[in-house]
Image (spheres, rainbow, N blue to C red):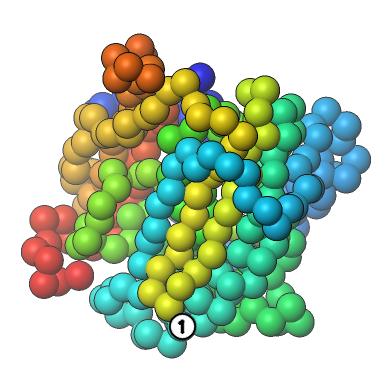
């Protein structure tokens, strides 16, 4: 089944379309905008009736592993103090407790933020790295994008449907150590920049996530072996300089779908990404 994004990331950018220079937003406008979108999300969650959200969690894992993936907890990032990454691990452990074992029954929707809840100091969340337009800064609950990135990437290897996903508007760090295509993650901001997945199949799907001392590890499980396997790849990758001086990076993510005999049955467009680069392009690995 073709994945669908319900936000701006789903619109394929024109290959040579000009990207305008980012606009400055006043603090008052940013606060007002966040309040508006936060309240609107709460209304959808608690007053809407069209969507049935997944709430069931079970300790026993479903028998079939569909896809598994891991990402390192610590990376050497230019200009980022390691204490932010240690705090990120604390935040991830708290969030994982709310997601591990969640089962999406047929017809249900998984909402990342509805299940995790608001990250606050009172719940034990610490200041981690939060991406802010064009840069990063400390923020309570920072680092949880690593978890949403992991879930999104794994989901692309399943028949679950992505109904809401947001891409990063800025490419903050170079590609050193990258093992996945640019733009294959999902950013998150409580509660309106969400990751939502819908189960259109006839089988329940279970998300299992945990941390080791070095890695964040996740897997999707279900009740029987799937009829298809998936391969995610990128096309149309480019970096160019805009008229206002900044550099822009874009690509398109596709997915090949194979049947149980290994025969290609579909080659599907997943999403397109465009981001303003916050580092000089073509840096060598030593500059990361």
* Tag 1 secondary structure: helix
Q: Residue at x 79, y 48 (%)?
A: 55
Q: In the orientation shown, which residue stands out farthest toward the front?
A: 63
Q: Nearer the viewer, residue 124 or 241?
A: 124
Q: Nearer the viewer, residue 191 or 95?
A: 95
Q: Residue at x 47, y 21 (%)?
A: 227
Query: Does residue 260 appear to the left or right of 77 in the view shown?
Result: right
Q: Residue at x 29, y 63 (%)?
A: 173
Q: Is residue 24 visible?
A: no
Spot occupied by residue 78 in the image (x, y as percentages of width and height): 26, 76
Q: Residue at x 90, y 40 (%)?
A: 47
Position of 108 relative to 282 (above/below): above
Query: Does residue 279 appear to the left or right of 26 in the view shown?
Result: left
Spot occupied by residue 86 in the image (x, y as percentages of width and height): 46, 83
Spot occupied by residue 31 in the image (x, y as percentages of width and height): 68, 63
Position of 232 relative to 166 (above/below): above
For label 1, count other residues whose C-alpha is less than 10 Å away and answer few (under 14), some (14-19) or many (20+): some
Q: Is residue 41 visible?
A: yes
Number of marks present in the image shown = 1
Residue 235 falls in image quadrant: top left
Position of 223 relative to 147 (above/below): above
To which residue does mark 1 refer? 86
Q: Nearer the viewer, residue 1 or 78?
A: 1
Position of 206 relative to 83 (above/below): above
> Quick one: quadrant of the C terminus?
bottom left
Spot occupied by residue 216 in the image (x, y as percentages of width and height): 45, 65
């Amino acid at each position: 089944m073709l994945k669908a994004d319900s936000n701006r990331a789903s619109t394929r950018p024109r290959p040579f379309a000009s990207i305008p220079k980012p606009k400055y937003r006043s603090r008052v406008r940013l606060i007002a905008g966040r309040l508006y979108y936060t309240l609107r999300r709460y209304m959808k969650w608690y007053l809407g009736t069209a969507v049935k959200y997944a709430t069931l969690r079970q300790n026993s894992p479903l028998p079939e592993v569909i896809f598994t993936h891991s990402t390192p907890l610590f990376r050497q990032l230019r200009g980022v103090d390691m204490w932010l990454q240690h705090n990120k691990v604390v935040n991830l452990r708290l969030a994982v407790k709310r997601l591990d074992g969640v089962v999406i029954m047929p017809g249900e929707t998984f909402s990342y933020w509805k299940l995790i809840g608001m990250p606050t100091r009172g719940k034990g969340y610490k200041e981690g790295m939060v991406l802010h337009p064009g840069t990063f800064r400390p923020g309570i609950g920072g680092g949880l994008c690593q978890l949403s990135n992991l879930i999104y990437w794994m989901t692309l290897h399943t028949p679950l449907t992505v109904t809401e996903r947001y891409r990063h508007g800025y490419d903050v760090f170079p590609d050193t150590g990258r093992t996945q295509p640019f733009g294959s993650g999902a950013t998150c901001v409580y509660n309106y920049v969400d990751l939502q997945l819908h189960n259109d199949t006839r089988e329940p799907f279970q998300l299992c996530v945990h941390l080791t001392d070095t890695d964040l590890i996740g897997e999707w499980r279900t009740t029987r072996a799937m009829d298809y396997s998936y391969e995610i790849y990128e096309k149309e990758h480019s970096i160019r300089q805009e008229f206002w001086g900044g550099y822009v990076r874009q690509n398109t993510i596709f997915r090949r779908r194979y049947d149980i005999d290994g025969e290609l049955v579909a080659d599907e467009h997943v999403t397109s990404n465009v981001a303003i680069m916050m580092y000089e392009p073509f840096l060598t690995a030593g500059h990361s």
